[in-house]
Amino acid sequence: MSFDSLGLTPELLRAVAAEGYTEPTPVQAEAIPLVLAGRDVLAGAQTGTGKTAAFVLPILQLLNATRPRARHPIGPRPRGATGLPIRCLILTPTRELALQAEEFIKTYGRSQPIRSTTVYGGVGYDAQIKAIQGGPEIVVATPGRLLDIAGQGKIDLHTVEILVLDEADRMLDMGFIRDLRRIIALLPPRRQNLLFSATFSDDVRELAATFLHDPAQVQIARRNAPIELVRQVVYPVDRSRKRELLSWLIRSGRIDRALVFTRTKHGANRLAEQLDDDGIDATAIHGNKSQGQRIRALDDFKEGRAMVLVATEVAARGLDIDGLPHVVNYELPTVAEDYVHRIGRTGRAGMEGDAISLVCVDEADLLADIERLLRQPIPRELVPGFEPDRRLRAEPIREIRRGNGRPAGAAPRRPAHRSAAPVRRPAPVDGPRSQPAFRPQSGPRPQASPRPMAGSRAYPPARPASGQGSPAGRPFAIMPGERFARSAE
C-alpha cells in the first residue's frame, strides 16, 4: 500500500515524499482514512509505529479544507491580534511529545502552513501566552500547563473541532485523569475525538467510553505486547555491581549506544556521573532538568557526543531517537506495563534492537510481574566474573508500587503531580544509595557458595553468556523513529 491510496491531498503527498517515505505503517494505513472521514478513533499501536503521523497528516488536511477567513493573514501579527480560532487541541503527557508533534505539523504542513504552538511546563508563561494570542489553529499541550493558562483566562477552547489524546495510557499513569476531565469540560460538545495509546488497558478503555462517540477501533498490536523485533535478556547481578557490569558491557562492545533507565531522578544523575568517571560519555535527562538542559542532553546523545543517555520513565516517554540499538533497564520498573514502554524505544521501524535488564535479588518479584504480563519468561544469562552472591538477602525497594500497596520500608509520599486527584503511580523515592566506586578487577570474581542462606530468595535459572562483542554483530544504522516505514529503496 502507498500513501496515494489513503485519500491525502497532493500537497501532503509531496511533503511525505520529500522526507523519503512511500509506504505507510499499519496504524497510518488504518487510521488516516478514518480520521479523514470525520470518525472518532480509538487507536492502539506499539511505540515506534508512527502514531503521531497517523493523526497529524489527516488533521492538516481537514483544517486546510475548512479553514475560516482569518482576521489577519498568515505571518507576523499586530500586538493583541487573535487571528484564527483554536480548531485542534492535541494533549500529550510530556513536553518532548508536544515538541515532536509540532515538528510533524511544521514538516508536513510546509506547503500549506497552519499556525501552531506548544504549551508545556518548565518554562515561563509569557512567551506561550503571546503565542496563543497570535491565533494558532493547533495547540499542542501538556494538561497541567494548559489548565494553568486556561485558569488565567488566556486561552479560549470553545472553538475546538478536533481533540487528540496522544499516549493516553501514559497520561493516566501520570495521574492526569482529573485534569483531562476538566479540559474536556472546556471544549464544545460537538467535535471529533481521537485517542491514541501504546496499550489498550482497561483504564484506557474506560476513559475512551467517557468522550468518544461510536469510535472506530484500530489495534495494530496485541494488548501489552512487547515489540517483536526486540531481543530481551536478563543479566543477574548483585545490586552493588550493577554499575560495574554496565561499564564492562559497554567497554566490551556488547552495548554500543544505549538508553538506560533508572527509577529515580537522583539515580539518573548519579549513574551518569559514575559512567563519566569510568571514561564513558554519558548524560542524564529527567523531570528536574530545565527544558534547555533536556534538549542539550538529547542532542548530545543523538549526535554521538554521549554514548549513554540515562533517563527516568517519564522523561524518556515520547523521545524520538532514530535507530536506537539498546535499551538497558538498570533498575526494573515497579509497574510491569512500563517495561513494555521502555523496551519499545528500540526495535522500531523494522530495525532489530536489544533490551538488557540488570536484575538484582531485590527485583525478583518485579521480574516475575513482568514475565506474567508478557506470558513468557525472559532469557537469563550469567556474565562470567559477575555472578551474583546467592547468600545476599533481598532488600525492600523503597518505592510505592501502583495497585500493590506500600512495600515494607517505604515511607509514604505525596504525589508529585499538582492535581488533587489520586494518581496511579506517585513519584518514587530513592532506592539504596550505597554503591562502591568502580574498580576494574584483574580477574573474574570468585563465585560464592551456591547454597543460599535461610530466608534468602533464589535467582531464576541462568545460562552462561555467549561470546564477546555485540549481541548480534550488526552494524549501527539510522532508521526513522516515530515516522513512517521507509521504502525498500
Image: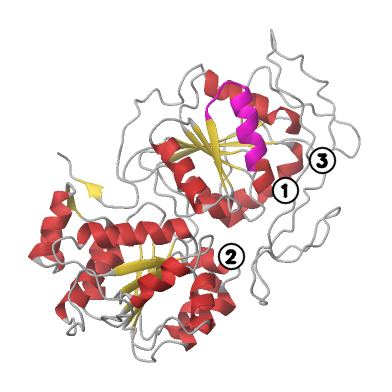
In front here: 434 or 401? 434
Q: CA distance from mark 3 to mark 1?
A: 10 Å
- As for residue 85 lying within the magenta part, the answer is no
Badge 3 amino acid: Ala
Disc 2 vs disc 3: Cβ atoms closer than 8 Å?
A: no
Q: CA distance from mark 2 to mark 3?
A: 27 Å
Question: Which residue occupies the extreme left position in the image?
Answer: 10
The residue located at (67%, 63%) in the rendering is: 416
Badge 2 amino acid: Asp
Q: Which residue is mark 1?
A: 365
Q: Is residue 283 visible?
A: yes
Q: Give coordinates of residue 250: x percent, y percent.
A: 53, 24
| Type of secondary structure dominating the magenta stretch | helix
Q: Which residues are magenta?
A: 268-281
Q: Give coordinates of residue 238: x percent, y percent.
A: 74, 30
Q: Which residue is mark 2?
A: 173
Q: Give coordinates of residue 376: x percent, y percent.
A: 56, 47
Q: Which residue is mark 3?
A: 394
Question: Which residue occupies the extreme top position in the image?
Answer: 442
In this picture, is 259 found above or below 141?
above
The residue located at (83%, 42%) in the rendering is: 395
Answer with left or right where residue 396 lies relative to residue 22: right
Nearer-N-terminus badge (2/3): 2
- As for residue 279 lying within the magenta part, the answer is yes
Answer with left or right where residue 454 lies relative to residue 133: right
Q: Quadrant of the N terminus?
A: bottom left
